[in-house]
């Protein structure tokens, strides 16, 4: 099977996965330790821009000459990813190098500016929890999107997400290592990241599900999507962990993602799995087992 075909499938499959992980990370990553109220946090260490980039050829973990940020070099974190065989004997695994374009540039821009509308399914849609295509495409300092033309129902979901604090513009870029894996049944996407902002975080998964269990988004030109969230039971991993099932219906298609996130000290791990549009959702029990393995690798 051609690697280019794998790249294309990973990019399409990562759409729902990144949407889901963004929803949780937006609610969980970027704050500081403190009281329970203080531990609700903002945007996280995983940039949706990473899903738009062409993945490089599979390579050994890179050894950067300079740390990109956070508390460990990306090359060091690569050793905390799952081994390729964990995804199955038939899996094609592609390493997304920590210094690949899009990881670090997206630390702020991918969250503060909203998710770009050019990635995703073949129709090209990119609603993120913060808005519709609210992005400066031509670099003139003016956002070129249609943020004001989008309606989110219920509005309490958007209100909840927008009420969460965001990291400072001066926050250091995280150290990141990531990989994507493809089989005939499922697309997997794993990220391990380190940043001081992750220290002491609590993941408000239950609160997010309560506020955003079913969300309808209406955009320009009659575009609409429905996103449903449900909590998924996974083993306890790290200092705090949680998982969601996210189902996205848009453009006549439906895609389901399972997403688990764990934090321990300044390190976070995200694992997601998606099935192709229209296919059954990934197996929750198998996902829980893989999530536990990923946690042992990331924090052990």
Image (tube, rainbow, N blue to C red):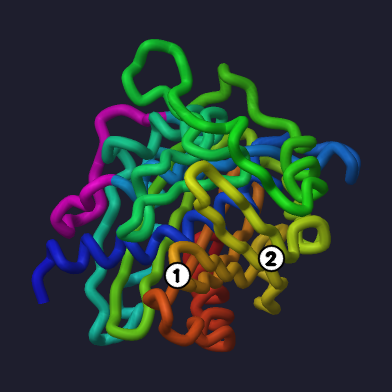
Can residue 71 be seen here?
no
Residue at the image position 55 percent from the left and 55 percent from the top: 224
- Cα distance in 3D space between marks 2 and 1: 30 Å
Which of 252/155 is in front? 252
Image quarter hosting the C terminus:
bottom right
Residue at the image position 55 percent from the left and 45 percent from the top: 219
Place residue 130 in its image quadrant: top right
Q: Does 161 sit left or right of 196 as displayed? A: right
Q: Where does the image place residue 250, in percent across and percent down from the top left?
A: 49, 63
Q: Secondary structure at mark 1?
A: loop
Principal SS element in the magenta part?
Answer: loop
Can residue 134 be seen here?
yes
Work out which residue is located at the far left of the displayed protein and give it.
Answer: 2
Image quarter hosting the N terminus:
bottom left
If you read the primary sequence from the N terminus, does the residue marked by circle 2 or circle 1 appear first?
2
Which of 121/3 is in front? 121
Verify whether residue 62 appears in magenta: yes
The residue under label 1 is 252
Q: Secondary structure at mark 2?
A: strand
Residue at the image position 57 percent from the left and 32 percent from the top: 147
Rendered position, 235 above or below 200 = below
The residue under label 2 is 242
Q: Mark 2: give few (<14), some (14-19) or many (20+) Cα within 10 Å.
A: many
Work out which residue is located at the far top of the displayed protein and give it.
Answer: 140
Q: Mark 1: give few (<14), some (14-19) or many (20+) Cα within 10 Å.
A: few
Q: Nearer the viewer, mark 2 or mark 1?
A: 1
């Amino acid at each position: 099977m051609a690697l280019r075909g794998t790249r294309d499938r990973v990019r399409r499959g990562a759409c729902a996965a990144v949407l889901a992980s963004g929803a949780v990370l937006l609610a969980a990553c970027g704050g500081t330790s403190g009281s329970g109220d203080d531990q609700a946090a903002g945007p996280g260490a995983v940039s949706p821009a990473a899903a738009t980039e062409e993945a490089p050829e599979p390579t050994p973990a890179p050894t950067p000459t300079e740390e990109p940020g956070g508390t460990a070099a990306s090359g060091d974190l690569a050793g905390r990813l799952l081994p390729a065989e964990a995804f199955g004997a038939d899996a094609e695994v592609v390493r997304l190098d920590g210094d690949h374009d899009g990881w670090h540039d997206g630390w702020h821009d991918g969250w503060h500016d909203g998710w770009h509308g050019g990635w995703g399914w073949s129709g090209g849609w990119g609603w993120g929890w913060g808005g519709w295509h609210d992005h400066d495409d031509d670099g003139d300092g003016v956002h070129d999107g249609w943020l004001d033309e989008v309606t989110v129902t219920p509005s309490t979901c958007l209100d909840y997400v927008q009420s969460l604090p965001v990291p400072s513009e001066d926050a250091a870029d995280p150290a990141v290592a990531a990989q994507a894996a493809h089989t005939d049944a499922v697309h997997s996407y794993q990220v391990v990241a380190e940043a001081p902002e992750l220290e002491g975080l609590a993941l408000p998964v239950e609160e997010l599900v309560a506020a955003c269990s079913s969300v309808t988004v209406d955009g320009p030109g009659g575009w609409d999507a429905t996103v449903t969230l449900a909590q998924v039971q996974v083993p306890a991993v790290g200092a705090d962990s949680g998982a969601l099932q996210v189902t996205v219906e848009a453009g006549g298609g439906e895609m389901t993602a399972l997403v688990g996130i764990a934090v321990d000290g300044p390190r976070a791990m995200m694992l997601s799995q998606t099935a192709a549009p229209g296919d059954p959702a990934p197996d929750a029990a198998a996902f829980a087992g893989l999530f536990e393995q990923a946690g042992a690798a990331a924090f052990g």
